[in-house]
Image: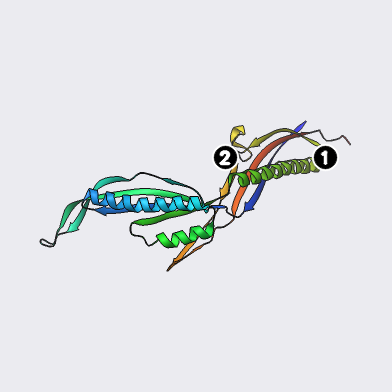
């Protein structure tokens, strides 16, 4: 019997279904209590708004981290000597993430908070629901497996080996020896996003998310017929 090793790949694309905004609230100053209070007040306002979005059904969930602070030294120019002197300063910060299912509501909220003092929009991430991702992965796995069978049979036909029979199939990373796409992830998810701001408008342009599957498989086929 002759063994044939092949690889199969499949990709599915789907529009993003969830958008998560990652916020960072930070203030700095010479008085620790002042900067902590500023962060706490702003963070509380944002959390209350996030809760309201969840209750309204336009957001799915929110997560936050407690306020923390640290000390650092800043060097500023002295008005008297003209040189630089060291000034003890404090910085406080807190983080908040909110996952929206309604992108219009997300866009509106970003427009409202992007100019709030102390609030930074770190990034936007785009995802699928768990149900959609599982369904796309199931479809991609079937197509990738079918591709391995087609490719193996093509090689067997070219060599006059007859029908092939599957021996083993490997999700990427599980094949010993690093062959057949062994260093690739079993599936990959990719999405791009762009946020453009101007005045009170925020335009969101999430790209479709790709779900990809890579498999490798071993098949066996008979020996060439004697002529």
Comparing labels 1 and 2, the label whose residue is closer to the camera:
2
| Residue 146 coordinates in the image, percent (x, y) | 73, 42
Q: Residue at x 62, y 44 (%)?
A: 131
| Residue 147 coordinates in the image, percent (x, y) | 72, 44
Q: Within 10 angstroms of label 1, few (less than 14), some, or many (20 or more) residues?
A: some
Name the disc covering residue 19, or none: none
Q: Within 10 angstroms of label 2, few (less than 14), some, or many (20 or more) residues?
A: few
Q: Residue at x 36, y 56 (%)?
A: 119
The answer to whether residue 104 is left or right of residue 36 is right
Does residue 208 lie above or below 220 as drawn? Answer: below
Q: Which secondary structure, mark 2?
A: loop
Q: Residue at x 65, y 44 (%)?
A: 135
Using the rendered view, name the quadrant where residue 166 is placed. top right
| Residue 99 coordinates in the image, percent (x, y) | 49, 50
Which badge, 1 or 2, is on the more N-terminal residue? 1
User: What residue is pinned by disc 1?
Assistant: 160
The answer to whether residue 34 is left or right of residue 4 is left
Furthest-left residue in this view: 80
Colour scheme shown: rainbow
Q: Residue at x 44, y 62 (%)?
A: 111
User: What residue is pinned by disc 2?
Assistant: 183
């Amino acid at each position: 019997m002759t063994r044939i090793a092949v690889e199969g790949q499949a990709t599915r694309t789907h529009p993003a279904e969830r958008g998560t905004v990652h916020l960072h609230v930070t203030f700095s100053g010479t008085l620790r209590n002042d900067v902590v209070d500023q962060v706490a007040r702003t963070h509380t306002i944002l959390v209350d708004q996030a809760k309201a979005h969840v209750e309204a059904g336009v957001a799915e969930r929110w997560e936050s981290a407690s306020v923390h602070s640290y000390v650092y030294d800043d060097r500023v120019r002295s008005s008297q000597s003209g040189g630089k002197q060291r000034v003890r300063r404090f910085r406080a910060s807190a983080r908040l993430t909110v996952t929206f299912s309604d992108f219009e509501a997300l866009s509106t909220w970003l427009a409202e908070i992007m100019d709030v003092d102390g609030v930074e929009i770190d990034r936007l991430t785009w995802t699928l629901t768990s149900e959609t991702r599982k369904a796309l992965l199931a479809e991609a796995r079937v197509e990738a497996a079918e591709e391995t069978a087609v490719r193996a049979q093509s090689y067997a036909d070219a060599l006059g080996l007859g029908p092939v029979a599957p021996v083993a199939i490997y999700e990427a990373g599980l094949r010993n020896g690093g062959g057949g796409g062994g260093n690739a992830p079993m599936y990959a998810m990719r999405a791009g996003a762009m946020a453009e701001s101007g005045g009170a408008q925020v335009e969101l342009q999430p790209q479709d998310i790709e779900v990809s599957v890579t498999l490798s498989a071993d098949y066996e086929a008979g020996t060439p017929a004697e002529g």
